[in-house]
Image (spheres, helix red, strand yellow):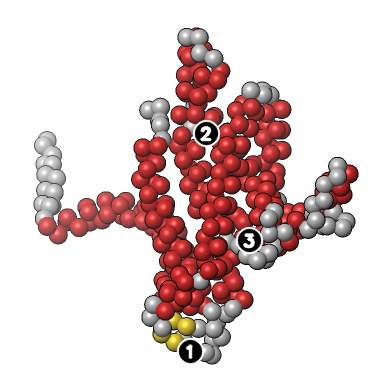
Amino acid sequence: MFVEVSAAPESRETGPADAPPRRWPALRRQLVPFAYLAPSVALLVVWIYKPLAETIGLSFHQWNMIPTTPKVPVGLDNYATVLALPELHQALWNTVLYIGAFMVFSLVLPVGIALLSHQVTGRSKTFYQALIFVPFLVTPVASSAIWRWLFAPDTGTIPRVAATFGADLGDVFRDPSVALIGVVVIVGWQMLGFGVLVVSAGMAGINPDYASAASLDGASRATITRRIVLPLLSPTLVFLALMTVLLSAQWTYPVIDVLTQGGPSGSTTNIYYLLYEFGFRNFDAGLSAAAGTLFFLGFGVIAFVFVRLSDRLSFYDN
């Protein structure tokens, strides 16, 4: 007995109409990364790019920040006024001084402290690094209030201790000759821990085999540090230098606002505090926006040049 087996139905031929369903899975896989990035891009547009565009547009108007007052177009007058202000020149010079001084606290001292703590082993190393990093966790406003109390001319602890050695500090934050130094010391004390943390992380990424091979060849510890460790730390040092240039004015702003208010006689002001004075003391939003736009362009050029030079200044082991 023969059983007739029906032939399997022929498969439907693939035509042009079947191509889109096959392409959709691949297209979805390509769109998944953009879906993950969409929330971050939206936040960047809302909180950074939109305010930046509004600031640039506001720089061409005169406005006293009162909502019922219309914005008066003034063209490039705000830019001409800002560039002619002597306060801007002094703020720029002070900002340069801050950047130069903070290079000591963000580069020189962190490298020395990291090299010394690298010689410590066990829990003591973690304790020393944490002890140095703690000031970075203190808010600038709170630390500024404490330092103001410590440097109080009549009741402060530091002037009293200095008086026992025959030194009269006076009112540090009202003396034009030492007020800027006081701000630098306070901010540098806080930012030192950040520099040590970054340098220590960079040293942890250096292969110890390089130092071991050099020591077998008779190289001293100083030679290993100078010829191996520091060159391999160059990417970290370049990063810290760039952050110091870009963020020095931001780091000093809260300390200036609490301790000196830019004085005495503008000796401690910087470009960020100058923006605050233009906008929220003089209520000249157009002038503040013009100054902010100029500072944005200036720091943008500095960052671009620094990033382009970083490839030449940095040394990698790969």
Q: Position of residue 129 (x, y in %)?
A: 67, 35
Amino acid type shown at disc 2: Gly
Q: Residue at x 41, y 83 (%)?
A: 74
- The residue sitting at 50% across, 83% down in the picture is 63
User: Please, what secondary structure does the residue beneath circle 3 have?
Assistant: loop
For image coordinates 63% across by 23% down, the residue present is 119
Residue 51 in view, yes or no: no
Disc 1 secondary structure class: loop
* Residue, disc 1: 70
Crowd rating for badge 2 (residues with CA inside 10 Å; few <14, some 14–19, many 20+): some
Q: Residue at x 44, y 57 (%)?
A: 299
Query: Circle 2 is placed at which residue position?
Result: 202
Instruction: State the residue in front, 154 or 292.
Output: 154
Task: Please determine whether, in this image, residue 94 is positioned above or below residue 69.
Answer: above
Tell me the CA gap for discs 3 and 2. Answer: 36 Å
**Residue 62 - label:** none
In three-dimensional space, the C-alpha distance between marks 1 and 3, rounded to whole angstroms, equals 35 Å
Reading the image, the residue beneath label 3 is 267
Image depth: mark 3 or mark 2 in front: 3
Can you give x and y, in whole percent of width and height, for residue 143 in the image?
A: 73, 54
Where residue 284 appears, as percent x and y from the top left, is 54, 79
Q: Amino acid at mark 1?
A: Pro
- Closest to the observer, 128 or 295: 295
Q: Label 3 amino acid?
A: Ser
Residue 38 can be seen in this image:
yes
Q: Residues within 10 Å of mark 1 (few under 14, many from 20)?
A: few
Locate residue 153, reporting x and y percent: 83, 57
Q: Earlier in the sequence, mark 3 or mark 2?
A: 2
